Amino acid sequence: MNKDIKFYIPFEGFYNSIYDSEIDSVIDGEIEEGYIENDDNIDYNIIYNEMSEHIFDTIEELFNDEFDLFTENGFFKYDGLSSPKYYNYSTDKIMAKCSPEVYLTILNHFKDNDDVIDYINENSKSRDGFVSFYDGYNEVIKDPAIYLQYLFEWFVLNEYRDEVIQQSFDNINEVIYNNL
């Protein structure tokens, strides 16, 4: 039996981010309009989890639209939101999983993509304050979870950052309003 590959999809997160600002804006507007008295009874964890699932769906759809690897979405599965205990070293990440077959399809598609290879080579090397366990593309591809995290870091936070943010904001207010 093939075991799913679990990995993280980096995104802007919810701490001092564009998403955090949107949540605050909607809640402040609802307070000003008198629809809610204050934010004391708002469960932000529910909002964050539902928003992260919405952002995940956006990333998956945009990734598939851009690279046309699969006939339909659903090749990744949302597996939750990972939030750090303290935000001084990292931010939230989406947890996802995929089958080994999906991983191999992605790996084969990007194996000659110089942008991805250069990105991984540059960002996986050791530098002041960071000792890499996976130095360079050839080391990174040995661990599917690490490779997918670097690939989606390249996709979500670099090459397609603006598109991810723009498309994830479609209907995001609905996610917030449904949880007030």
Image: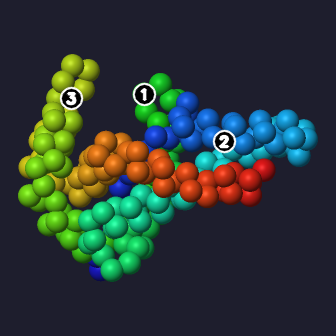
Residue linked to disc 2: 23
- Which of the two discs, 3 and 2, labels the residue nearer the N terminus? 2
Question: Which secondary structure lies at badge 1?
Answer: loop
- 33 horizontally vs 77: left or right: right
**In the rendered image, is residue 10 in sight?**
no
What is the CA distance from the residue labelled 3 to the residue labelled 2? Answer: 36 Å
Mark 3: amino acid: Val
Where in the figure is residue 48, as x and y percent of width and height?
61, 48
Where in the figure is residue 18, as x and y percent of width and height?
54, 37
**In the rendered image, is residue 122 in sight?**
yes
Q: Are marks 3 and 2 in contact (CB under 8 Å)?
A: no
What is the CA distance from the residue labelled 2 to the residue labelled 1? Answer: 23 Å
Instruction: Tell me which corner region of the image, top left, top right, bottom left or bottom right, holds residue 145.
Output: bottom left
| Above or below, comparing residue 67 to residue 145 in the picture | below
Pair 2/1: label in front: 2
Question: Which secondary structure lies at badge 3?
Answer: loop
Mark 1: amino acid: Tyr
Residue linked to disc 1: 89
